[in-house]
Every structure is written in C-alpha cells, then in structure tokens.
Amino acid sequence: MSKAYQRGSPGDISSAQDVYCCVLCKRPDNSLVHCDVCHVNLCKTCVGEHVFDKSQEHRIVTFENRGFTCNFPKCKEHPSKICESYCTLCRIPICVICFSSKHAAHERCDILISEAGRKQLIQNDLLELKNIILPKYQKAASALKNMTDNMCKQFQKLKENIKTQGEFLHREVDNIVQDAQTKIDDIESKTMANANIIETSINETVNQISKHMENLKGLLNLSFIRFLSAYNPQNEKYRKPPPTLQLSVPKFTPGKINREQINQQIGFLENLALNTGMECSWEIEDQFIDEPRILINVTSDTPKSTVACLSNDEFWTCGENKVATLHKSLQEIKSLNIKSISDVEDVHVAVTLEEALVFASSRFIFKHTLIENSYRPRNDWKDNIQTLITLSESIPLSVCCTSSGDLLVIMTSHDKKQTKVVRFSGSEEKQTIQWDDQWKPLYSSGGKPDIKYITENKNFDICVADNNAKAVVVVSGPGKLRFRYLGVHFSTEETFDPFGITTDSRRRILIADKSNHRIHILDQDGQFLRYIYGWKLRFPRALCIDSKDNLFVTLDKSVQKIRYYE
C-alpha cells in the first residue's frame, strides 16, 4: 500500500510499513530520491526523464536529505530559472541570466545573505513594534482615558458652581442659568465626542499594530524566500506619535447679583476653541527613509576613529595608524602622517570655518592649513602646521568647531579624575563646563580607554557622547544640563554603547551605538525618534554631517556616506 508524500524535516525517515511511490512510474520503492525544487519523489530509473524536462531547473537529492535545499523563488522574467542572487539596487531576486544582463552593472549579493538581512529587518521591526511603538500607543490610550475622566469631574464641578451661583438669585434668573448649563453641556458633548474619536483612532491603530505583529511573527516562521522577499516594512506609518487631546476647561467668572444686569451678573463662560490635537505636524518624521541609501562606500585597511567634513564631497578621516587622510568621493587626495606629532591613543580631527584641519596631542592642539587649496603631496607639509593651543594640565579627548568659530575640547586631567569641556576662542580659554546644579560631575572620568566625542547643535547645545558613562550628556550653551540620554533598546540584554555624535540642520542628534550596530536619532530635546540600522551597518564609530544632511559614518573597515531622509 502506498503512502502520499508529505514534506517534513530532513531527518524524517520512513518506517518499515511506509512505502513511497515514484511520481512517474507509480511503483513503490524504498530507495527513492527527491527533487527538492519540484517536491516530488522519484525512483532512480525515472530520474533522467524528470531532469530532461527543461521547463525549470531541478535539484535531485537523496530521500533522507529532502528539504535541505533552499526554496529559491522563480525568476519573473525567466520562469525556467530560479533566483539565487539579489539586486540591492532594484531590491528584487534575480536569476543567472538577469545577473549577467539587465542587472550586470548593479550591486548584487547572494540571495541567502540578502534574506538573512531581510529576516533581521523583520525581527528589528517586530521588536520596535513590541517594545517602542505599541507601548507608546498604549500609554497614549491610558493617558487619554485618565484625562477624559478628569475632564468629566471638572465639567461636573463647573456645572455645580454655576448652579450654586444661580440658587442665590430669584426665579427671574432661572432661564439664564439653564442657558449657561446648556452651553456647558454643548461644550462637554463636543469635547467627549472628540475624545471618543481620538480614543477610537488609537484603539484601531493598536489593533492594527497587534495584527501586523502577528503577521510578522508568521513571516519569521516561514522558510519560503519568496514571501520574505516580498516583505515591505510598514513601521513608518506607525512611528508618528498618537494624537492627543489638548483642552482647557471653560472658565466661569461669578459676578455681583444685580437684577438690572442679571445676564452679566450670572457670569461668563469663556468658550475656548476646541483643539483635538489630531492635526499634528509630521514634517520631520515623514521624511525618514525606511532603508537609508549608501551614496559612497570607501574601504580602509584600518578602522577610522574620526571623520570630519571639509565639503559635501571632501572629508578627513584618521584612525589607529595616525594618518589623517583627505578623501574626495572615492579618491584619496592627501594624507598626513601625524604619528610623530600626536602622542594620544585616539586622534580626533575637526575642520574649522576656514577649512583648516585641527587635531590634538597630549599637550597641544594643532592646526593644518592646505596651501592655496592644493591637494598635491608635499614634502614640507609640516611647515603648514601650527600650534593653536598649549595645554598644561589636561589631555584632550575630542574636539569640534562651533558655528561661531570657537573650538570645544573635552579633556581629562592627567590623574584621570576630572573631565571637563573647555571653549577656546583662538588660544584663549573662554568657558569651562564641568559640574551640574548640584555640583556633581557632568562627565565620567578614569575610563580605560576614555572614549568621548563632542559636537555642537544648531541651537548651541553642547552634546557629548560619554562611552564610559553609557550616556549622551547635553548642556545648553551657557553650560546648564538639559538632559541625559541613556539609550532606547529593543531588548533589556542590550547595553547602550555611544561613540560618535553629530547633529543635522534640523537640530536632530545622531549617535553611533557601536556594539549594537545602529545609529540613534533624537530630537533636540532628547526624545527618541528612530534608529538607522541594517545588515551593512557594522560597528559604527565616528559620525559627521555635510551641508546637505548626508551622514558620514566610519565602520569596521570602511567609511560610508548615507542618505537617511528625503
């Protein structure tokens, strides 16, 4: 008696009583093979006839190894071929014919690598929905419920106050009191109606998110690549903050009772315009790209600890080899070996308003100026370096140039016990930032290594990524603590690992989270907006932004120029 084939795990082996039949000759056979593309059983005699069918490719494996071959999708343009590659530019699976023809000039990768990244994207989206977006909506729904309950109490209290005032009057004021209550009831009904609309909208979104999460969980359990390839992230439409209800309770002003001016003496209701909070501005968030585009990728033999933009096409880098390199797009046009000058472990560079390169040693801040904007290699390049600042008691950790032309330097004392930010105008020290309002240190000290990055925001806030404290510390221009950001994560097992920091033209703060392979984006007040992440973003370290808001990021062995919003 034959048994219909049902696909199982590769380790499933038929028992003695299970006899499988060849799909062509229908004869039972215990030594069958299997076509892992067509998912049919074949005897050894019929294998040739099956493979002779050229309408599609075939993969013949032993019966015990069935299911090991990946279920590659068929090519839409060449149905007889399967897709084993993925075009990262067109974002579609491609077969060997497409690989060598239509997509020959495009960036391509093995489809298994692509789908591994796609699964990671799904996993990240699911975690973001579960741990960040859904709790945000649930919190908004709870807050709205508490707000409406409180508003009901205040409306009731308001009506009771008016009623009490009306009881002091004679019968001739009854109609006026009734009129006032009618107005309040009208406002209350409109308010509650708007609240119900918002509550219904939020609850519907919560249900949609929950349903979407279930769909994503289902996708993660699928082994069919064609479904994963067709996955289109939808988290963007849920990242907008939930609508809120912003209302003020109408004010009641009691007046002195006067029969002749009864209408005025009963009091006034200030009929405030209703604001449902539903017409929020999404101007900034709507512009984020779900999968940021890599505009330039420059490979490197050594990791780069710092990057600084000279222009939209030119940027300086420096790494462990202490060679400062000037790039123009993909071309290296100048390099400076500063090993003999700078004795600090990690050399950080910055670019001044005059387009000069600034870097530090343990006792000095140096400035290098390009002669007549010439990029030709020179043997006398040291003649173009001048000592800008001499330091006697501190070791610089990171430096940046401000919009006013000042230099901000975060430095630590020689005994590693104190860390501070110092503002220099030329070589003159203008400001020191070290303590908060309770005279507690703003920045950590004594880290090994002591990793800190500094930048200035467009609102003149000073932002420091303090890796040893696992925090980003933001102070105002005068040095008053505004907030500390400790990271937002998908999982409690992750630890915030801040390295490079920069800001864009919209005052958003971008932070490299190195060990978690992502970049955090905050608004100017420290509110988390979203991540930049992807399977190509490995160990991000230093960051900078050009005048077009393109992001330069140094990775393990490369520097990338990324467009993360439109």
Image: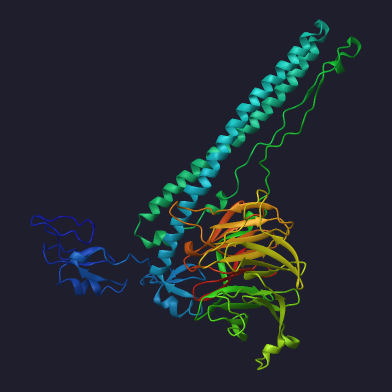
Check the picture and name the quadrant holding the C terminus: bottom right
- Which residue lies at the image location 62% right of the left edge and 71% below the top edge? 395
268 left or right of 116 in image: right
Check the picture and name the quadrant holding the N terminus: bottom left
Give the quarter of the image for residue 343: bottom right
Q: Which residue of the protein is positioned furthest toward the left in this rendering?
A: 16
Q: Measured along the vertical axis of the image, is residue 410 above or below residue 559?
A: above
67 left or right of 365 in image: left
Of 57 and 71, the residue lying toward us: 71
- The image shows residue 532 at horizontal and vertical percentages of 55, 61
Give the quarter of the image for residue 140: top right
- The image shows residue 175 at horizontal and vertical percentages of 79, 11
Q: Is residue 406 visible?
A: no
- Which residue lies at the image location 62% right of the left edge and 81% below the top edge? 327
Q: Which residue of the protein is positioned furthest toward the top in this rendering?
A: 171
- The image shows residue 80 at horizontal and vertical percentages of 35, 71
Q: Is residue 5 visible?
A: yes
Q: Measured along the vertical axis of the image, is residue 322 above or below residue 260?
A: below
Q: Which residue of the protein is positioned furthest toward the bottom in this rendering?
A: 379
Of 548 and 253, the residue lying toward us: 253
Of 401 and 545, the residue lying toward us: 401
68 left or right of 209 in image: left
- The image shows residue 137 at horizontal and vertical percentages of 55, 42
